Amino acid sequence: MNKLPEKYDFSEGSTNPYLVEKRHDLLAPCLNCGIFVPVVLDGASYFNYFVRGNSVAECFPTLSLDQRELLISGTHPECWDALMGEDK
């Protein structure tokens, strides 16, 4: 397992996914290369997605398409482009 870079260690932050906290600092690992990508999520949206199972688009309309894809597929933009090819 990759060691988290110190600047991305949010171990003092959100620990209980069932609490509706103000924000969750998520470190999403790319399933292709293992790089950790930080994504900040607001508490209510986090709860609606991870606990209630609502869609990514519904819960996180303010995230970029790349950030939402990371949550859905576990693939960050550079690996996605390498696997699927860039849009022309």
Image (cartoon, grey):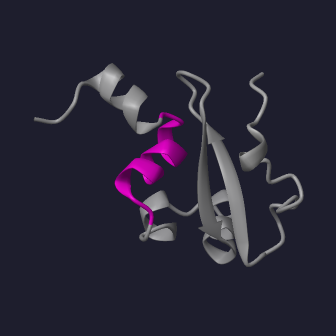
Percent coordinates x, y for residue 15 in the rendering: 87, 58
| Corner quadrant of residue 74 | top right
| Corner quadrant of residue 63 | bottom left
Q: Is residue 72 magenta?
A: yes
Toward the left, the furthest residue is 88
From the viewer's perspective, is residue 73 above or below residue 2?
below
Left or right side of 82 for 45: right
The magenta region covers 63-75
From the viewer's perspective, is residue 35 above or below residue 14?
above
Residue at the spot 70% in from the left edge and 59% down from the top edge: 25
Residue at the spot 57% in from the left edge and 27% down from the top edge: 31
Percent coordinates x, y for residue 40 in the rendering: 61, 62
Q: Is residue 51 visible?
A: no
Residue at the spot 78% in from the left edge and 75% down from the top edge: 21
Main SS class of the magenta portion in the image = helix
Residue at the spot 49% in from the left edge and 60% down from the top edge: 55
